[in-house]
Amino acid sequence: QVHVVESGGGLVQAGGSLRLSCAASRMIFKINAMGWYRQAPGNQRELVAAITRGESTNYADSVKGRFTISRDSVKNMVYLQMNSLKSEDTAVYYCNVFPSEEYYWGQGTQVTVSS
Protein backbone atom coordinates (compact mmCIF):
# COMPACT_ATOMS: atom_id res chain seq x y z
CA GLN A 1 0.00 0.00 0.00
CA VAL A 2 1.38 3.41 -0.98
CA HIS A 3 1.23 5.92 1.83
CA VAL A 4 3.21 8.82 0.38
CA VAL A 5 4.06 10.00 -3.12
CA GLU A 6 6.74 12.65 -3.55
CA SER A 7 7.09 14.89 -6.59
CA GLY A 8 8.61 18.16 -7.75
CA GLY A 9 12.29 17.33 -7.86
CA GLY A 10 14.54 18.20 -10.76
CA LEU A 11 17.73 19.86 -11.91
CA VAL A 12 18.25 23.46 -10.86
CA GLN A 13 21.16 25.87 -10.80
CA ALA A 14 22.67 27.02 -7.54
CA GLY A 15 20.64 29.91 -6.15
CA GLY A 16 17.45 28.62 -7.72
CA SER A 17 14.25 27.31 -6.18
CA LEU A 18 12.12 24.18 -6.21
CA ARG A 19 8.89 23.20 -4.52
CA LEU A 20 8.47 19.60 -3.49
CA SER A 21 5.06 18.05 -2.92
CA CYS A 22 4.04 15.01 -0.91
CA ALA A 23 0.64 13.40 -1.30
CA ALA A 24 0.02 11.46 1.90
CA SER A 25 -2.67 8.97 2.75
CA ARG A 26 -5.39 10.38 4.94
CA MET A 27 -4.65 7.76 7.57
CA ILE A 28 -1.15 8.97 8.35
CA PHE A 29 -1.69 12.63 7.58
CA LYS A 30 -4.46 13.12 10.10
CA ILE A 31 -2.71 11.59 13.10
CA ASN A 32 0.94 12.40 12.60
CA ALA A 33 3.47 15.14 12.32
CA MET A 34 5.07 14.99 8.88
CA GLY A 35 8.62 15.46 7.77
CA TRP A 36 10.85 15.86 4.76
CA TYR A 37 14.08 13.90 4.76
CA ARG A 38 16.96 13.61 2.32
CA GLN A 39 19.77 11.24 1.49
CA ALA A 40 22.80 12.23 -0.51
CA PRO A 41 25.12 9.60 -2.03
CA GLY A 42 27.32 8.07 0.64
CA ASN A 43 25.41 9.78 3.45
CA GLN A 44 22.80 8.67 5.91
CA ARG A 45 19.25 9.83 5.52
CA GLU A 46 18.65 13.01 7.51
CA LEU A 47 15.71 15.09 8.62
CA VAL A 48 15.36 18.33 6.68
CA ALA A 49 12.16 19.77 8.14
CA ALA A 50 9.12 18.69 10.14
CA ILE A 51 5.67 20.08 10.78
CA THR A 52 3.16 19.10 13.45
CA ARG A 53 -0.59 18.90 13.07
CA GLY A 54 -0.68 22.31 14.78
CA GLU A 55 1.78 23.57 12.14
CA SER A 56 4.74 24.04 14.45
CA THR A 57 7.88 23.59 12.41
CA ASN A 58 11.51 22.74 12.90
CA TYR A 59 14.40 22.69 10.46
CA ALA A 60 17.88 21.30 10.12
CA ASP A 61 20.43 24.03 10.73
CA SER A 62 21.72 23.64 7.17
CA VAL A 63 18.40 24.74 5.64
CA LYS A 64 17.11 27.30 8.12
CA GLY A 65 16.10 30.51 6.40
CA ARG A 66 16.10 28.84 2.97
CA PHE A 67 13.50 26.06 3.17
CA THR A 68 9.88 26.25 4.30
CA ILE A 69 7.67 23.28 5.13
CA SER A 70 3.89 23.57 5.01
CA ARG A 71 0.86 21.29 5.01
CA ASP A 72 -2.62 21.42 3.50
CA SER A 73 -5.03 19.54 5.74
CA VAL A 74 -7.80 19.57 3.14
CA LYS A 75 -5.71 17.96 0.41
CA ASN A 76 -3.52 15.80 2.70
CA MET A 77 -0.45 17.40 1.16
CA VAL A 78 2.91 18.41 2.58
CA TYR A 79 5.15 20.86 0.74
CA LEU A 80 8.79 21.88 0.92
CA GLN A 81 9.65 25.22 -0.64
CA MET A 82 13.39 25.31 -1.24
CA ASN A 83 15.06 28.63 -2.05
CA SER A 84 18.68 29.66 -2.49
CA LEU A 85 19.60 26.10 -3.32
CA LYS A 86 23.20 24.98 -2.94
CA SER A 87 25.10 22.09 -4.45
CA GLU A 88 25.13 20.40 -1.05
CA ASP A 89 21.33 20.21 -1.18
CA THR A 90 21.64 17.60 -3.93
CA ALA A 91 19.95 14.45 -2.67
CA VAL A 92 16.91 12.24 -2.93
CA TYR A 93 14.16 13.85 -0.88
CA TYR A 94 11.59 11.75 0.96
CA CYS A 95 8.38 12.43 2.81
CA ASN A 96 7.47 10.42 5.92
CA VAL A 97 5.79 10.85 9.24
CA PHE A 98 7.83 12.49 12.00
CA PRO A 99 9.53 10.70 13.63
CA SER A 100 9.98 8.52 10.57
CA GLU A 101 8.70 4.97 10.36
CA GLU A 102 10.26 2.40 8.07
CA TYR A 103 6.93 1.26 6.71
CA TYR A 104 6.08 4.66 5.21
CA TRP A 105 9.14 5.40 3.06
CA GLY A 106 8.23 6.25 -0.52
CA GLN A 107 10.32 6.37 -3.69
CA GLY A 108 11.52 9.90 -3.10
CA THR A 109 12.22 12.63 -5.60
CA GLN A 110 15.67 13.55 -6.88
CA VAL A 111 16.93 17.09 -6.44
CA THR A 112 20.12 18.01 -8.24
CA VAL A 113 21.69 21.43 -7.81
CA SER A 114 24.37 22.36 -10.30
CA SER A 115 27.07 24.84 -9.29
Image (cartoon, rainbow, N blue to C red):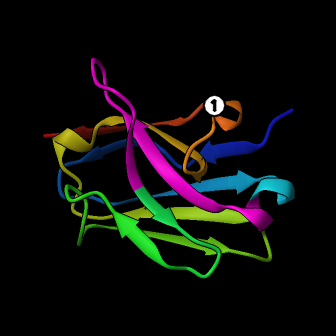
- In this picture, is 22 found above or below 113? below
Mark 1, residue position: 102
Q: Is residue 12 left or right of residue 18?
A: left
- Confirm whether the magenta stretch covers residue 92: no
Q: Quadrant of the N terminus?
A: top right
Looking at this view, is 108 or 112 the one in front? Answer: 108
Q: Quadrant of the C terminus?
A: top left
- State the residue at coordinates (81%, 36%): 2
Residue 85: horizontal and vertical position, in percent? 23, 54
- In this picture, is 23 found above or below 45? below
Report the span colored magenta.
29-48
- State the residue at coordinates (59%, 59%): 34
- In this picture, is 41 found above or below 68? above
- State the residue at coordinates (26%, 41%): 113
| Badge 1 amino acid | Glu
Question: SS at mark 1?
Answer: helix
- State the residue at coordinates (78%, 42%): 3
Residue 10: horizontal and vertical position, in percent? 43, 41
- In this picture, is 1 found above or below 87? above
Question: To which quarter of the image does residue 81 belong?
Answer: bottom left
Residue 41: horizontal and vertical position, in percent? 30, 21
Residue 95: horizontal and vertical position, in percent? 57, 47
